């Protein structure tokens, strides 16, 4: 748990310090919503994020059980599958997670679930980096479900999973920056803070995490005018 929280504090804290404290005036033209999140909101984001990581850390017990008893597709030596597969497996994890995240996100917007779970995350209509994992505990359990999906589906090395989880924390924080930094958009179908801001202000659109593929395919993609 300590490692997860430390990693998140660094990943969310550095851009928050850079954009919201030190460079607050310098980068104001890139702020998607011109208002700044209140101190109360930021503290709530941190509170619920810590709860989320407590839920995530509890998942280590079934994970260790599955791993110890050989139920997963884990392998120990990179040479067993080669370095190319090692790199490809990380990309596969990202693609699987993108699909999983889109459909779980859509599920949590169902009227029977939304007000009991995902509504909490939507309290933060003007997100900051700290809001990325500010979830209801039940939503935390659902989002954590990507781990068993991956470890039972594809051959995976320990370091590939570590890299994937680090990337997940990084990218979820990135799309909650609240700032439109054009230089960080590398290709057309990349999900960005600008795209995700639409979702926080209009929950009918832009459910994707890493990419906009699923949103475009399912007709839930909405483009917002760029800031800056």
Image (cartoon, rainbow, N blue to C red):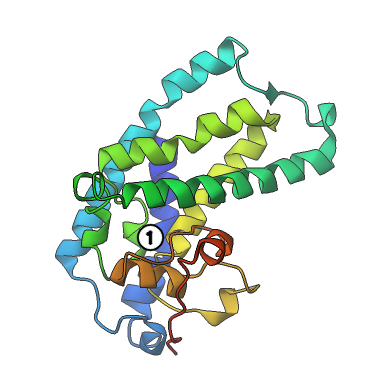
Q: How many marks?
A: 1
Residue 105 drawn at (x, y percent): 40, 51
Q: In this figure, which residue is indicated by the disc labeled 1?
A: 13
Foreground: 49 or 17? 49
Task: Name the image quarter holding residue 74.
Answer: top right
Residue 161, by quadrant, is top right
Identified at 55% across, 32% down, the residue is 149
Q: Is residue 127 visible?
A: no
Name the residue nearer the viewer: 172 or 111. 111
- The quadrant the C terminus occupies is bottom left
Rendered residue at 59%/79% (across/down)? 183
**What is the quadrant of the N terminus in the image?**
top left
Residue lying farthest to the top in this orientation: 69
Whether residue 67 is situated above or below residue 109 in the rendered picture:
above
Residue 156 in the image, given as x and y percentages of width and height: 68, 31
Q: Is residue 105 visible?
A: yes
Assign a secondary structure to mark 1: helix
Residue at x 23% of width, y 71% of height? 37
Left or right position of 116 against 144 = left
Up/down of 58 relative to 134, above or below: above
Residue at figure coordinates x 57%, y 12% from the top left = 68
Residue 47 to residue 208: above or below: above
The percent coordinates of residue 224 (x first, y second) are 43, 81
Q: Residue 90 appears in which quarter of the rendering? A: top right
Q: Is residue 29 left or right of residue 100?
A: left
Classify mark 1: residues with Cα within 10 Å, few (<14), some (14-19) or many (20+).
Answer: some
- Vertical arrangement, residue 31 with respect to residue 144, above or below: below
Given residues 150 and 113, the one toward you in this image is: 113
Question: Horizontal and vertical percent for residue 216?
Answer: 55, 67
């Amino acid at each position: 748990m300590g490692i997860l929280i430390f990693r998140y504090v660094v990943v969310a804290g550095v851009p928050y310090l850079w954009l919201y404290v030190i460079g607050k005036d310098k980068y104001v033209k890139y702020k998607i919503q011109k208002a700044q999140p209140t101190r109360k909101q930021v503290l709530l984001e941190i509170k619920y994020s810590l709860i989320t990581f407590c839920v995530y850390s509890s998942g280590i017990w079934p994970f260790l059980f599955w791993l110890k008893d050989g139920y997963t597709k884990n392998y120990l030596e990179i040479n067993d599958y080669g370095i190319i597969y090692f790199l490809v497996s990380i990309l596969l994890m990202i693609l699987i997670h993108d699909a999983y995240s889109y459909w779980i996100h859509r599920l949590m917007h169902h009227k029977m679930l939304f007000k009991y779970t995902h509504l909490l995350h939507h309290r933060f209509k003007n997100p900051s980096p700290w809001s990325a994992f500010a979830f209801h505990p039940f939503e935390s359990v659902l989002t954590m479900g990507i781990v068993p999906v991956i470890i039972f589906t594809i051959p995976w090395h320990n370091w590939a999973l570590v890299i994937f989880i680090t990337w997940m924390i990084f990218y979820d924080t990135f799309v909650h920056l609240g700032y439109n930094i054009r230089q960080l958009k590398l290709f057309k179908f990349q999900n960005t803070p600008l795209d995700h801001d639409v979702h926080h202000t209009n929950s009918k659109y832009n459910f994707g995490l890493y990419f906009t593929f699923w949103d475009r395919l399912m007709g839930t993609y909405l483009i917002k005018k760029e800031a800056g």
